[in-house]
Image: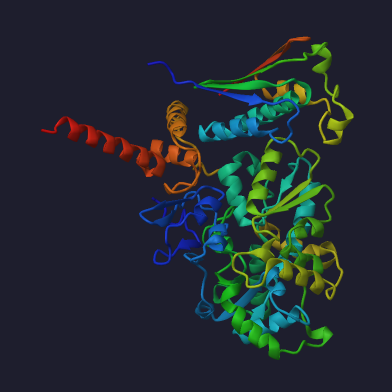
Amino acid sequence: MNNPKKYYHSVRLDKEKCVGCTNCLKRCPTEAIRVHSGRAHIIDERCIDCGECIRVCAYHAKEATTDSLDIIHNYPYKIALPAPALYGQFRNLPHVSCVHQALKLMGFNAVHDVALGADIVTRAVQERLKQPGCPRPLISSSCPVVLRLIQIRFPELLENVVDLRSPMEVAATHARKEFCRAHDVDPSEVGCFFITPCAAKMTAIRNPIGHETSAVNGAISILDIYGVMSGLLRKIQPLPEGERGFRATALGVGWARTGGEATAAGIENALAVDGIEHVARALEEIENDKLSGLSFFEGLSCVGGCVGGPLVFENVFIARNRIRELLFRLPRLKPEENISDEVMHELWHDLHMNRSIQPVQVMRLDEDLQKALEKMDRVEEIRRRLPGLDCGSCGAPSCQALAEDIVQGYAHELDCLFLLKARVRDMAKQMVELSDSTRV
Amino acid sequence: MGAITLKESYPVEAGDFSTAGEASGKIKRVLKKLGIDSAIVRRVAVAAYEVELNLVIHSMGGHMDLIVEPDYLQLNVHDRGPGIPDVDLAMREGYSTASDDVRTMGFGAGMGLPNMRRNANDFSIRSTVGVGTDIEMGFKL
């Protein structure tokens, strides 16, 4: 690759642990995994960092690379950006602000809620929907996995994606500006770290979609800090009501769950879908113009929403319910009542994407249609010879995928165990015939 | 050597909502694999879905044939009846003969045929009552 950064991925394979089974192979929504020589390989161009393979691997051979907590010390001033999903992880949490206290005990100078970034993005989505010529349905840009899925499988829908950065980005920009102003320090001295339930966010920081650089300096997995944090939380008493300093709305925290974004923006005619395969199916419907009248589409890769991310500790349904309960203890403000026009004005530029999202053409057989047609012809011819069991033993997720791999030169017909068996049988027969005919 | 042409035929069963959308889904996947411009893929997909649902709802079954040449794509659809008595009327937006049952499923808005014509570059329809309907749609690549 000319550009090594082009295909950075958080989701990686631990070669030592992989036994070469077919669990991840069959689960990957972009057919990005092949098993060769007894272990899995991830095709970087196709991987969208959804983390499905991490969830399904019984051998824990798939992992998400995130930053260790130590990296925060690379900066004189450290700001934690907790994802709303973090609040659903702890039992008997008296108030969300206790998590802020714990983060400060862990070495952060300040805590700035991504939920507050969500409040700001909510306002911007509302504004965008009011603009004339706004595409319908407007598609949420908050889940980086869904953005990658659209780039790869639904390029025609890219123009429907709202041109806003994610709440994580907005929170980082906002936090840094406020901190520098309050403490009179240089922006380069302030490190902003996302506390993440999501592997794809790590990728989004290294390789942002829709803008050149990220305002976030690192991503720390919720799983990595869960132990320390739950220990601290057992000792922490909630601060008196006036000193909690929790600035996000309940609706902003509600972004942790599927439908949180659409609910926060108060959009009628919105559709929220979670689980990457379900999202793909809903996008098919949108692509077929079957959802006319829909104003807004929120697709989230993980079942339950961010609270079901691959890097969380707690069961998604339990965590989701905890978020629901915590919301009762937060002010019932609307985002437009919480975020002033001044804040919107100050962040307006940094809130928006500044480059268009390009399609990623990795599924097509060839750049040239004539050659693609020829290849398709051969794919069909080969596929008819394959058993159609989609067993995965050859290392490709389906017979169709193997046929395509063969035509592209990545695989051989005898990778199919059934064709190999038939070939061995034929050869054995020929051997017998040969030995019979040469018998003296 | 002549240009390679892709020819695929997809059968469509009448009244079978469990498989409705499969043929147009397959067509869409094939076109994406071929790397055809995404705007064209979308137009073909919309037209293919409309015509497939028409076959499921109104016809006695039929098939959809996809022919892809380097500069032109054809979607030829043939069904086994019952045929459309007044094609001009059927081509009008909002005109539908769909039953209430089908309407409760969200179909029958009378947009099917006009939508196909709008999405295709070339469109022709021939229908004989008691025999069947042929629709030919062409898309420039």
User: In the shown orientation, is residue A256 left or right of residue B101?
Assistant: left
The correct choice, above or below, for A376 with respect to A238 in the image is above
Q: In the displayed image of the protein, which residue is found farthest to the left?
A: A440
Which image quarter holds the N terminus of chain B?
top left
Residue at the image position 49 percent from the left and 22 percent from the top: B70
Pinpoint residue B60: horizontal percent, then vertical percent. 74, 20
Rendering quarter of residue A344: bottom right
User: In the shown orientation, is residue A159 left or right of residue A48?
Assistant: right
Rendering quarter of residue A287: top right
Residue at the image position 80 percent from the left and 62 percent from the top: A341
How is the structure coloured here?
rainbow
Which image quarter holds the C terminus of chain B?
top right
Between residue A68 and residue A304, name the one nearer to us. Answer: A304
All told, the count of numbered labels is: 0
Q: In the displayed image of the protein, which residue is found farthest to the right?
A: B100
Pinpoint residue A106: horizontal percent, then vertical percent. 60, 84
Between residue A203 and residue A259, name the one nearer to us. Answer: A259
Whether residue A160 is visible to the viewer of this picture, yes or no, is no
User: In the shown orientation, is residue A204 left or right of residue A40?
Assistant: right
Residue at the image position 55 percent from the left and 43 percent from the top: A359
Q: In the displayed image of the protein, which residue is found farthest to the front?
A: A440
Rendering quarter of residue A198: bottom right
The correct choice, above or below, for B109 with respect to A212 in the image is above
Between residue A73 and residue A275, name the one nearer to us. Answer: A275
Pinpoint residue A343: horizontal percent, then vertical percent. 75, 65
Whether residue A322 is visible to the viewer of this picture, yes or no, is yes
Pinpoint residue A104: horizontal percent, then vertical percent. 65, 84
